Structures are given as structure tokens and as C-alpha cells.
Amino acid sequence: MKVGVRLPRLLAAVLIVCLAALMAGFAGGGSVQAQAPDPDSLVHDIAKKLNCPTCAGISLADCQTDTCMQWKQEIRTQVVEGKSQQQVIDYFVARFGPTVLQEPPKQGVVLVLWLLPVILLIAVVASVIIVLRRSTRRKADVVSPAAASKESDDYISTLEEQVGKS
């Protein structure tokens, strides 16, 4: 048996063993219970995604004003009621508008702002490529001094031949 044939069979065997182990993990996974998220950490995670209503540029999680404490309490109440993280965020956006979000939504006019750096980067790279291609074409069009002197010598030789014939 050739060595080239052994390697694919070995890789196939390793892949089958890994898949079998993975499937066994899923099959036996029923005994492991998912741990419910800690309400305090969930409140903190949600608060990190919201702006402080009174302080500019500070997340709700980092601010200790009375208003922020009230908002955090509202988040805690909704989390205890069983609302998901997205439902709580949607509640605040519906009540206070999209400016309450630490990170603006990636839709509408804001989507253009998110894409603008990528578009500018592509434009700069394309411009650099175009400039480099044009400069290499110009260099190819410019005749080197050695080639120019050779052409000049050929012209002079031809001219001398014609003068000599007359």
C-alpha cells in the first residue's frame, strides 16, 4: 500500500472518531443542566448597552446617578419577570428612542455611517492600485538612455550609408 493512500484513510478515521465523540457528548448532554444566568450579571450586560440619560458618553453600567440607579432597577424588574435581554433593550428604545443605545442600530442612515470607513478604505486601495499601474506604464513608455543612444546610432549609421551612396 502506498503512503499517499494511507494518509487520507488515516484522516478519515480520525474524523469519524471525532464525530463519534461529539455525538456521544450531545447524547449524554441531557444530564447536564443549563445554568440560569445570574440576574446581576444580566442587568450589568444590559446596562453596558445603554447610555446614561444624564451623562454624555457614559454607559448606564458605569454611571451612579439616581436616574441610572432607577433605570437599573427597572432592568432588574424586567429580568426577574423573565424578559430577555433584547426585550428589555427594545423597551428602553421604544420609550426613549435609539439614542439610548451605546451602539447605534446598523440600519437606515446609520448603516451608511457604519459602512463609510470600509467604503473609504476600498476607494483608497483602488486609487493606490490605479496610480501604481499608471506609473509603471509611464516608466515602460519612457525610453531608456541606452536604448535611445542605440536608436540614435542606428539612425546615424543609416544616414551615413545613404550619404555615402550619393
Image (spheres, helix red, strand yellow):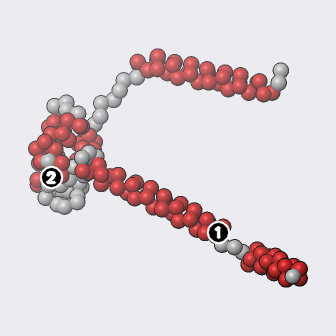
- Please name whichever residue, 156 or 95, is drawn nearer the observer in this view of the structure: 156
Residue reaching furthest to the top: 27
Q: Amino acid at mark 2?
A: Cys
Q: Do tag 2 and tag 1 residues touch (Cβ < 8 Å)?
A: no
Residue reaching furthest to the right: 165
- Please name whichever residue, 47 or 165, is drawn nearer the observer in this view of the structure: 165
**Residue located at (17% from left, 60% from top):** 55
Q: Circle 1 sits in a helix, a strand or a loop, which is it?
A: helix
Residue 122: image location, x then y, percent: 44, 55
As drawn, is 46 to the left or to the right of 162? left
Residue 100: image location, x then y, percent: 18, 50
Q: Amino acid at mark 1?
A: Asp
- Please name whichever residue, 125 or 104, is drawn nearer the observer in this view of the structure: 125
- Give the labeled residue for mark 1: 141
- Give the labeled residue for mark 2: 68
**Residue located at (56% from left, 19% from top):** 20
Q: Which circle, 2 or 1, is nearer the viewer?
A: 1
In which quadrant of the rendered view does residue 87 lie?
top left
48 lies above or below 7? below
Chain-order first, disc 2 or disc 1 = 2
Residue 53: image location, x then y, percent: 14, 55
- Please name whichever residue, 147 or 114, is drawn nearer the observer in this view of the structure: 147
Rate crowding at label 2 as few (under 14), some (14 to 19) or many (20 or more) other CA atoms within 10 Å. Answer: many
**Residue located at (13% from left, 42% from top):** 94
